[in-house]
Image (cartoon, rainbow, N blue to C red):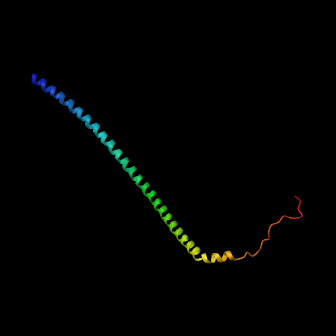
Amino acid sequence: EKTVYEKTELKKDLEAKIAQLESLIKKLHEEIEEAKKQIAETEVEIKKSSQTREAENAEFQKVVADQRATQSILAKALQKLKDFYVKNMGSKVALAQQTPPVQFNNYKNNEGASP
């Protein structure tokens, strides 16, 4: 009878342990499912971020290309202005020596006006 009692107690202990482990397994499965959902959400966010980053990079590259083109155009314009003004330095002196087409008289007060 003692062995039956011990075996019954052992059986009860083992059944309790099995129930505890089954609940732990269930809990762990739920946590795994939640983790999988979070991973899927994170992957979607990563893809969205990647697409946004690609669009922003494309816009940035376009702006940089526009700025480089503008710099090139301005450099060419500056060079043409330098060429024009350096070549025409001698003729600038000639322009300064020309007389204006109309000579202005000296300013004097109107003699018929009252103060």
Q: Is residue 65 left or right of residue 91?
A: left
**Where's residue 10, x and y in %?**
15, 28
Report the residue at 41% width, 52% height from top.
49
Q: Is residue 14 left or right of residue 101?
A: left
**Where's residue 7, x and y in %?**
13, 27
Pick the residue in front: 59 or 97.
97
Image quadrant containing the N terminus: top left
Q: In this view, does 61 lie to the left or right of 79?
A: left
Q: Is residue 61 left or right of residue 10?
A: right
**Where's residue 31, x and y in %?**
31, 40
Pick the residue in front: 73 or 79.
79
Report the residue at 51% width, 66% height from top.
71
Pick the residue in front: 96 or 83.
96
114 is higher (above) or lower (below) than 30? below
| Furthest residue in direction top, as rendered | 1
Q: In which quadrant of the rendered view does residue 82 lie? A: bottom right
**Where's residue 35, x and y in %?**
32, 43
Image quadrant containing the C terminus: bottom right
Pick the residue in front: 72 or 91.
91
The total number of labels drawn is 0
Report the residue at 23% width, 34% height from top.
21
Report the residue at 29% width, 37% height from top.
27
92 is higher (above) or lower (below) than 6? below
Q: In which quadrant of the rendered view does residue 88 lie? A: bottom right
